[in-house]
Image (cartoon, rainbow, N blue to C red):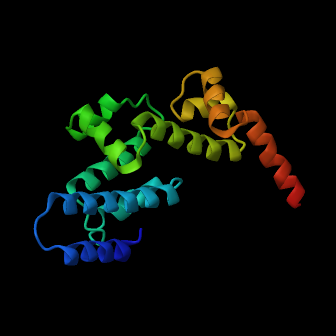
């Protein structure tokens, strides 16, 4: 994350108006959310690194940013389970509405869409290892129905899990 860039933007906002104007605070929080969103997009496949960066003292995160990072960490740890938003809210001792607002504010996306994306990325990793069947991969990423997993995977990537795996195999043989 570009922490210095965020601090520079914050100083620019502060220097333009030293009064406690609510619109300045909103602008500041919106910019922080944009930086957080960009960092998340860059670190999609490394959620734990993203969470650790937000939780580090150099980032100087707000309470909501820390809570959002905890949400992502919990989701990563519970990918293989039926991880509902209610379970997440209960684990973090906040309301479901609070979790919904965090995802909406920081990513402009829903909890479900982020969870699905995390599951698809994890499935791609499992499929590239060639150790498990597609049904086993579906189960490993928390989707109990093989056909539904194939539907979701195709919807997200444009190819079925089997086609994805075959493409990886063809690429490996083409390199050799």
**For residue 93, above or below residue 169:** above
Report the side of 134 relative to 8 (left or right): right
Report the side of 94 relative to 20 (left or right): right
The image quadrant of residue 38 is: bottom left
Q: How many marks?
A: 0
Residue at left offset 80%, top offset 45%? 167
Residue sitting farthest toward the left: 19
Depth order, front residue of 46/140: 46
Residue 148: x percent and y percent?
60, 22
The image quadrant of residue 153 is: top right
Report the side of 165 relative to 95 (left or right): right
**For residue 95, above or below residue 33:** above
Depth order, front residue of 140/163: 163
Residue at left offset 27%, top offset 60%? 27
Residue 160: x percent and y percent?
72, 33
Report the side of 1 relative to 91 (left or right): right
Residue at left offset 78%, top offset 48%? 168
Residue 3: x percent and y percent?
35, 72
Residue at left offset 34%, top offset 57%? 33
Which quadrant would the C terminus be assigned to in this image?
bottom right
Residue 43: x percent and y percent?
50, 58
Which quadrant would the N terminus be assigned to in this image?
bottom left
**For residue 11, above or below residue 43:** below
């Amino acid at each position: 994350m570009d922490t210095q860039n965020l601090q520079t933007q914050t100083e620019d906002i502060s220097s333009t108006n030293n009064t406690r104007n609510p619109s300045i605070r909103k602008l500041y929080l919106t910019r922080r959310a944009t930086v957080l969103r960009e960092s998340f997009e860059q670190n999609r496949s490394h959620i734990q690194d993203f969470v650790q960066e937000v939780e580090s003292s150099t980032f100087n995160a707000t309470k909501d940013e820390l809570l959002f990072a905890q949400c992502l960490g919990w989701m990563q740890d519970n990918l293989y389970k039926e991880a509902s938003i209610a379970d997440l809210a209960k684990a973090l001792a906040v309301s479901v509405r609070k979790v919904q607002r965090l995802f909406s504010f920081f990513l402009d996306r829903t909890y479900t869409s982020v969870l699905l994306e995390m599951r698809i990325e994890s499935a791609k990793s499992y499929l590239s290892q060639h150790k498990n069947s597609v049904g086993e991969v579906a189960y490993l990423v928390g989707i109990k129905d093989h056909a539904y997993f194939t539907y979701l995977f195709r919807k997200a990537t444009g190819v079925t899990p089997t086609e994805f795996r075959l493409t990886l195999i063809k690429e490996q043989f083409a390199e050799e």
